[in-house]
Amino acid sequence: MEIKTISEFYEAVCDKSGTKINPDVLEVLQKTPATGNLTLKLAGNIRLRRVQRLSDDDVLILCKCLQNNQHVTGLDLRYNNIGDDGAGHLAELLQQQNSALRSLDLMFNDIEADGAKALASSLQTKSSLLSLRLSGNKLGNRAAMDLVSMLQVNNTLQELQLDDCDLATQSVIALSIVLKSNKVLRCLDISRPLLFSLQEDWVIHFSEMLAVNGSLLELHLGKMEMTDSGMERLTEGLKLNQSLRYLDLRCNRVTRDGVRRLAEVLKKNSALEVINLSANRIEDEGAAYLSDAIASPGCILKELSVSSNNIRTDGLLSLVQAMKTNSTLTHIYIWGNHLEEPVCLAFRELISSSRLPPEQTDVSAYEVDGRVFLAQVSNSLRKRWFRCDAGHSSSSG
């Protein structure tokens, strides 16, 4: 019988190899259209129902089904049980001369150094891949250095996510050095590395990189233990950078002095549009510095998160006043600070007057016995701003 669909091919390959069919994979493939570019969504953390997570054997069968397939341009394989062998199978798929894959999401699997090395090697030669997400895999320093070597020669990859991958200082610095010459990468996330030194040497290298890099649009430096000294060095490079749009500095140790340096950049930098400062220590004075920058004509900031920064009434009201002065800032997130009644009244006014749309902040006003309060809502700053276009989605839900 002639095989016409990818699901029929999957069943035939499983039968030939003696591999048990994964019902969740089969369900997704049965819903996959035969035409048009699409992303197969096979994440192992589907809400409201249990799924059979993919193993290395499942990945092998899937890769066989995708050989010569020109419609599947993205694979979402997050939260599965894929290890080094599975990563090796995917690397072989990427090396196919006619590979159509543009995005590969392997976040929070069991991939370690050997699997990452295989993926890095596959991307050193001609590759169509635009986005590689490896967050949450314990790659370590050796694997990170393999990825650095890949970036020296790869001329297609635009997004690389390596947060929570146990990167060491050596690989963090190496990434900054390679980005001085790499002109293709648009988004990099190295949040939560394993840095055992408080000297912040890595910041010097990132500052030097930002001074000369003209292609990076999004940079995530969360949970890096960055202090005001580090922020001072980083802003030296930001002053010379005209490409970065999104800067993520969440969960660091930045206080009012560090934010003062950043505010000086915002007054003159015509590129930065999104800044995440949540879970730092900027307090009222830091909020005042930001407010002054937001109200200045040279600031084009559109989205700002200052949640959980020990900001009180004066600091939050200064931000409200800045929003009234400058209409550029359209998203602001403040939950986790001291939301006393004057602040509640001010934000209720911003929201009710349509200056601040309800979906563009993380608080909502309500009234009890004549007093106004703010409640937390689920909105938050976009974790990812840059997107690679890998086609439409085929969901397992």
Image: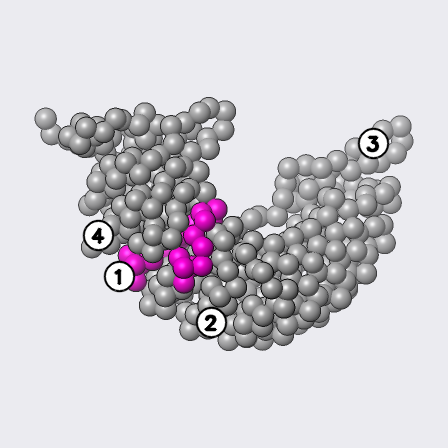
Amino acid at pointer 3:
Glu
In the image, residue 240 lies at what x, y percent? 58, 75
Which residue sits at x=73%, y=48%?
Answer: 308
In the image, residue 61 lies at what x, y percent? 24, 36
Q: Mark on residue 126?
A: 1
Amino acid at pointer 4:
Gln
Query: Between disc 4 and disc 1, whose residue precedes?
Result: 4
Query: Between disc 1 and disc 2, whose residue precedes?
Result: 1
Q: Quadrant of the C terminus?
A: top left
In the image, residue 16 lies at what x, y percent? 15, 30
Residues shaded magenta: 120-145
Q: Mark on residue 367?
A: 3
Which residue sits at x=35%, y=38%?
Answer: 40
Q: Mark on residue 177?
A: 2
Query: Between disc 3 and disc 1, whose residue precedes?
Result: 1
In the image, residue 271 lies at what x, y percent? 58, 66
Number of the front mark, 1 or 2: 2
- Asked whether 119 falls inside the magenta stretch, the response is no
Query: Between disc 4 and disc 3, whose residue precedes?
Result: 4
Q: Is residue 70 left or right of residue 82?
A: left
Residues under labels 2 and 4: Cα distance? 30 Å
Residues under labels 4 and 1: Cα distance? 10 Å
Q: Which residue is mark 4?
A: 96
Residues under labels 4 and 3: Cα distance? 61 Å
